[in-house]
Image: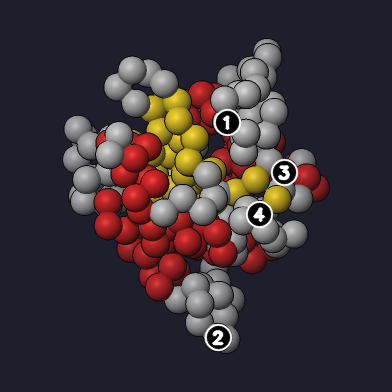
Amino acid sequence: MLRRTCLFASSLLLSPFALAEEKVGIRPNSVPSHPEYEELRAGTQIEHLYESMLANGFGIKNPDAKPDEPTVVIVSDTQCPWCSKLWHASLPLQGNVNFVWFPIPVLNDLSLDQAALILSSKNPWAALAEHEEHFKDPDFRGINPAGKEVDKKFRAEVWSNAKIARWSGLTVVPLGVFKNNDGKYLPIFSGTDTKGLEKIIFGK
């Protein structure tokens, strides 16, 4: 079901492949809600999502990103149109912000295949950029993984991301999280444009 977000297919996130990795984060004992953010579904723990993805997830980041740049975690699906829109909104800021994209399989099997192929690339960032460049191609949405062998460990990495997302209470993609200098975790929702990103990250 597509609105401005892509809703999780719970059967995907409960796949046995999601249990493949030894450690993908500490499961929270309680899952607080965030009443100040009406768009954030009750039970979504953005703090756990941000910290566990960076510590134990398998993300795609710009190799040219500088250590002092603000870091934004974004959970997405390669087949999600609103995830692609958020990617394009982030482009003008990619020289000043370290966007780290964590792919999870939400919409269909192709999401898993594409994510695993991108993660297996010698330069995953370039592969993700290529995928987004071809997202609106009339014949195929993004890069085509057909006929390309990918080591099963990369599929397990995608499922590990999915497990972290599930334990964090995530129910929609895309969802981004930014941790500001005060230690506050700020959600970034579907439909956020470049100016919206600047306001959240830089307070402009």
Mark 4 or mark 1, whichever is nearer to me: 1
Is 75 above or below relative to 142?
A: above
Q: Nearer the viewer, residue 95 or 143?
A: 95
Please name the residue that numbered disc 2 is placed on: 138
Give the CA separation, mark 3 to mark 2. 29 Å
Residue 98 visible in this rendered orientation of the protein = no
Amino acid at circle 1: Tyr
Amino acid at circle 4: Cys
Which residue is at 49% across, 62% downward?
Answer: 84
What is the secondary structure assignment of the residue under circle 2? Answer: loop
Res 13 label: 3
Mark 3 or mark 4, whichever is nearer to me: 4
* Image quadrant in which the N terminus is located: bottom right
Residue 166 % position (x, y): 67, 35
In-image side of 3 versus 56 (left or right): right
Res 37 label: 1
